[in-house]
Image (tube, coloured by chain):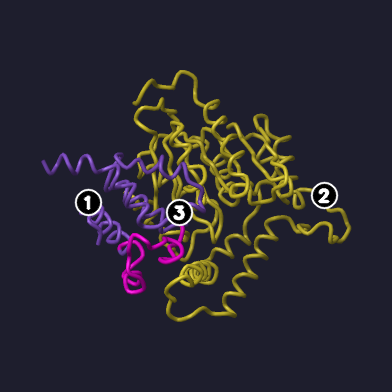
Amino acid sequence: MSEVHANGLRFHVQRLGPPADRPTLRTPVVFLHGLVLDNLSSFYYTLAAPIARAGSEVVLYDQRGHGRTERPRTGYDPDTAVADLAALLKACDVPTPVHLVGNSFGGLIALHAARTRPDLVASLVLIEGQCLDLRTDAEPTGTEPTEAEPYAGGWVEEMANTLNLAALGLEAHPGPERLPTGPARKAARLRAGADALLNGTTLIEDVTLLRAPTEPELVDLACPVLAIYGELSELAPPAGRLSELLANCTLTVLPGVAHTVLREATAPVLGALLDWLVRHEPAGTRSGVGR
Amino acid sequence: MSADPHADRILAEVAGMLAEIVGEELLIAAEITPDSGFDDDLALESIEFVALAGRLQEHYGDRVDFIAFLADLEIEEIMAMTVGRLVDHIAARTRTEALDGAR
């Protein structure tokens, strides 16, 4: 059942179950991928299978407009993303609360879910997820941004600028009318998908209007949070602040990597996640063999 | 075609699934043989391979233990795989059953 209808949309969903002979962790793990060029495959090829094999029920889906899920014109804001998540879990009969694992923008959605639908979330795992916007939160310094501060506008503005540039580039250089065959096909399809999403939906508008969560909004976050960030990432300082702010946050900073930790540091991310899942299973809920 | 009707049947099933996932354009563009590489020859997107894996799991069930098969491979190895390697894995896992059924 890889097609699921939820919140008025057809979603591409993949579910992986634990082997029958493994003790099963009861809390399901749901993965939320990043923006535009990303889809569930980045988790499917990295964390999903080992996590399922270690005993968890795994749910992956392509978010609206991404991968093989339908691409409506609107609804690319975090509120709708959380509504999609809630409807999808219900449609799939996934028992809640779940561990939410979000990569990049998927982390922001996971964080938004924990704030607005705490009933759905047992714990959060943020892999390079956007969280606080330090520049927006900080008092104005009165100084102009320097070259040493490339993200002076904060990550919301930076992300909106990047997407706008990509959209203009795609519009200015239209692809072939007919998709090529052979090796060129894959690049052409990726390009066409990004073009349709950036120039054919409200995604950029929705991201531009986005407001990063503020410190007072996050301070009461009840669920445990595992924050995994790259040492060289621009998001490492906000993650550091997040871990200071939250009562129950474990920060893991991976040396030598930037934003692409999932791809470039898969093994340590997997190790941290496996350990986290076992330690955050509610007491007394581990069953014996099978279910 | 090889001298192995069991593997030939699985190859045909995999080719049919690929056509459903990618569209008929794939069949026009390339003949699907055991030597076809998912990346090099068929230019399959990562997400299309995921869709194929999902269908294989649905179709052949836990016998093929696709999760364990994929968990042992790096993404580069998965994309560099040939149709034949995938077919061989499924054939090996389902052969006893096919023989049982033929008796």
Answer whether residue A200 is magenta in the image: no
Residue found farthest to the right: A143
Q: Residues within 10 Å of mark 3 (few under 14, many from 20)?
A: many
Residue A223, given in percent of the width and then of the height, sits at 58, 32
Under mark 1, the amino acid is His
Q: Main secondary structure of the magenta part?
A: loop
Using the image, name the chain to which the residue with label 1 belongs.
Answer: B
Q: In the image shown, does A167 or A144 lie closer to the viewer?
A: A167
Q: Which residue is mark 2?
A: A139
**Within-10-Å neighbours for mark 1: few <14, some 14–19, many 20+:** some
CA–CA distance in space, label 1 to label 3: 34 Å
Q: Colour of chain B?
A: purple
**Which residue is at a point 58% across and 65% down the rendered structure image?**
A204
Question: Which color is chain A depicted in?
Answer: yellow
Camera-side residue of A35 and B94 = B94
Quarter of the image for the C terminus of chain B: give it: top left
Which mark lies nearer to you, 1 or 3?
A: 1
What kind of residue is marked 2? Glu
Question: Is A147 placed left or right of A204 in the picture?
Answer: right
Residue B6 is marked as 1
- Range of the magenta residues? B20-46
- Snapshot quadrant of residue A244: top right
Q: Is residue A254 above or below residue A189?
A: above
Residue plotted at (37% across, 51% down): B53
Q: Residues within 10 Å of mark 2 (few under 14, many from 20)?
A: few
